[in-house]
Amino acid sequence: MTTGVLLMAHGTPASLDEMPEYLRLVRGGRPASDELIAEMRHNYAAIGGRSPLTDITQAQAAALRARLGPGTPVAVGMRNWTPFIKDALAELAAAGVTRVIGIPMAPQFSTLSVQKYTEAAMAALPSGVSFEAVHSFHAHPLLLDAFAEKVRAAQPKSDELVAFTAHALPQRVIDAGDRYADEVAETARGVAKRAGVTRYAQAYQSAGRTPEPWIGPDLGRLIDDKSGEGFRKFLIVPIGFVCDHTEILFDIDIQAAQVAREYATTLRRTESLNTSPTFIALLESLVRSQS
């Protein structure tokens, strides 16, 4: 039996021209409005025209491949854009892989992200290939260490409020039993403890453009509320994400930073994990624990 690894992520268009088709896939086949397409093109243009998500995930795969050795193929598959999960599975099967370990590039489990990655993989599984998914690694010691290293490197100031953030979800999903919010809170506690942070807040970001309620507090609202309590400086630690992409480079670095300026406060964030050696060691640990 030959084992291979599939790193699974959301996906991102390679150019602004691909935005309409990308959004159609994200929306389950429903075309996006002209307004949404224009908004997303504006956001991507503000960070240079494209997200580095795919490039960084490929770099993470290369770093993991180097740790595992040549006998364990590692592929990258995206749910909503190329390289698609189904194509990555076909690539692994062509390399002789008969067992795939799937790792979602999202630390906390959610039925709207991690579960959908797994479902996409199971639906596209080549004949004769088995699939074993890692569902969550939100409290893995190496993940907490990796984030804590970034917090310590940022050297939080005594008058700076550390705010841990993760992607928002619709409230109805949590009400239906999704454990995502609990796992985000556990990650925050673990990172704070390792980094020696005794005072912190937790917020959510990047909520979808739908009228239904999303879990909060939203990062912008947190800045509003805490500035009213006298906080003038914020250090954002995005513990729901493992690399730079639009939700980091635009939603935090541009959008949230603008909100902070409006409240006469300052905002900065920790570096993303990207190819952090500790994070890559975590991925290796996840693979070997499945062996």
Image (cartoon, helix red, strand yellow):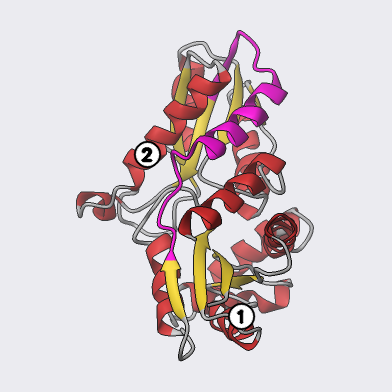
From this viewpoint, is residue 113 visible? no
Residue 151 belongs to the span the image colors magenta: yes
Looking at the picture, which amino acid does disc 2 mark?
A: Gly
- Residue 115 appears in the rendering: yes
**Amino acid type, residue under disc 1 in the picture:** Leu
Q: Which stretch appears magenta?
A: 133-162
Rendered image quadrant of residue 186: top left
- Tell me, for residue 92, which label it has, or none: 1
Q: Position of residue 101 (x, y in %)?
A: 50, 67
SS at mark 2 in the image: loop
Q: Give the side of residue 108 with respect to residue 156, left or right.
A: left
Residue drawn at x 45%, y 51% is 207
Q: Nearer the viewer, residue 215 or 58?
A: 58
Residue depicted at x 67% and y 78%: 18
Res. 216 mark: 2
Give the quarter of the image for residue 47: bottom right
Please tell me whether residue 248 is drawn above or below residue 197 in the rendered image: below
Classify 10 Å Cα crowding around label 2: few (below 14), some (14-19), many (20 and above).
Answer: many
Residue 38 magenta-drawn? no
- In the rendered image, residue 152, in percent from the top left (x then y), is placed at 66, 22
Q: Is residue 37 left or right of residue 268?
A: left
Q: Residue at 40%, 57% (x, y): give it.
A: 135
Q: Nearer the viewer, residue 155 or 136?
A: 136
